[in-house]
Amino acid sequence: MSALSEDDRQPAGNRPDPAGDERLLAGNGPDPVGEGPHLVTIGESLARLEGPAVGPLRHARTLDLGVAGAESNVAIGFRRLGGGAAWAGRVGDDEFGRLIQMTLAGQGVDVGRVIVDPVAPTALLIKERRTGRLTRVQYYRSGSAGSRLSPQDVPEDLIRRARVLHVTGITAALSDDAHAAVHAAVDTARAAGVPVSLDLNFRRALWTPAEAGARLRPLVMRSDVVFATEVEARLVTGGADASALAAGLAALGPREAIVKRGVLGAVACCDGDLYDEPAVPVETVDPVGAGDAFAAAYLAERVLGRPIPERLSAGASAGAFAVTVQGDWEGLPSREDLILMRATDDVVR
Ligand code: KDG
């Protein structure tokens, strides 16, 4: 079952048009004039500080400054694959807020709907790569500008014209207002026939499993595409293994439920059919951002109407690229990169 038949359910304004798809495939071109971004996402982005090398942070003499944020990572990943993407959120009236806007704009993401909060600061995330495969994260985000996101901040007009709305459980965990903003964005998308994509993205530092389960389950029920790890899937459904969990998620409503399994790949339950996608073996430098990379590539292929196996394959390749590079989004692939990942010989270009 392809997204083309999915799109048959949508109002005419949201159906793919061949010219738009050409522009998407061309990659890195300007956003389609007058169409608005294909993907709209809303959430909190943070300034990111991390040591330059693997090891305890207390021994780092310097810290690298960058940008983090699950939703903005997806926007960048989708943009690198050629789609137009917009990120909406709140940042503080400070240097970190300006860094976030500048970085996303530099990656071609539409930041025209970002709100600069005059009172609250931009949030901060500190990353410690303890080993190549284990990263510890600490937040300084309580009371941040991003956590003050509210339903009034939702860019309804952009969402109505989009091909997909992407939201995550992180934003739903930040505050009651931010949770309401996620639902308001979903309301707008559903009313306009725009597919809703949800990554559960459970963060232990933000809420308990019970709280997360209670708030994420209704969001799953209102989504068309859901991404989760096995642990996250168990917050809202049951199942003996990843396939059963994917089926359990799909039984809550989404037509496409994807359970990501790290080095074991991913399984998906889409319109009742099960799919198994192996991971692409690579050397992991920093695992953070792999899930966002997967979602970005899956959604980029979905918007193009590609069949499920191609969406999953692109997601696995993008996830592999993400973990080979330090940083949450810096390693995200272009279309050309995606093809190279599947090359069987060493490639020099
Ligand atoms: O998925 C990666 C994100 O987790 C990271 O970029 C930062 O949004 C973030 C968070 O809250 O952990």
Image (cartoon, helix red, strand yellow):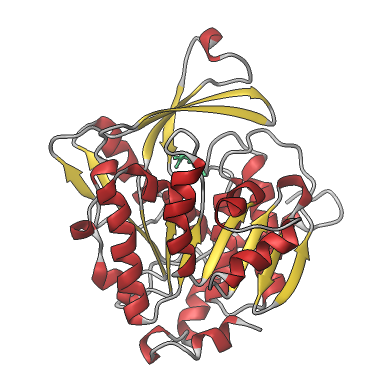
State the residue lying farthest toward the left.
Answer: 118
Front-lying residue, 135 or 283? 135
User: Is 158 on the left-hand or right-hand side of 41?
Assistant: left
Residue sitting at 30 percent across and 33 percent down?
A: 96
To which quarter of the image does residue 304 belong?
bottom right
Give how far across and how far down residue 135 sits, in percent.
Answer: 60, 29
- From this view, report whether residue 131 is shown above or below residue 302: above
User: Is 159 on the left-hand or right-hand side of 328?
Assistant: left
Residue 73 seen in the current view: no
User: Is 266 on the left-hand or right-hand side of 235?
Assistant: right
Number of numbered callouts drawn = 0
- From this view, report whether residue 181 is shown above or below residue 135: below
- From this view, report whether residue 44 is shown above or below residue 195: above
Give how far across and how far down residue 145 sits, in percent.
Answer: 24, 39
Front-lying residue, 161 or 252? 252
- From this view, report whether residue 9 is shown above or below residue 349: below
Residue sitting at 64 percent across and 62 percent down?
A: 258
Give how far across and how far down residue 301 sits, in percent.
Answer: 59, 71
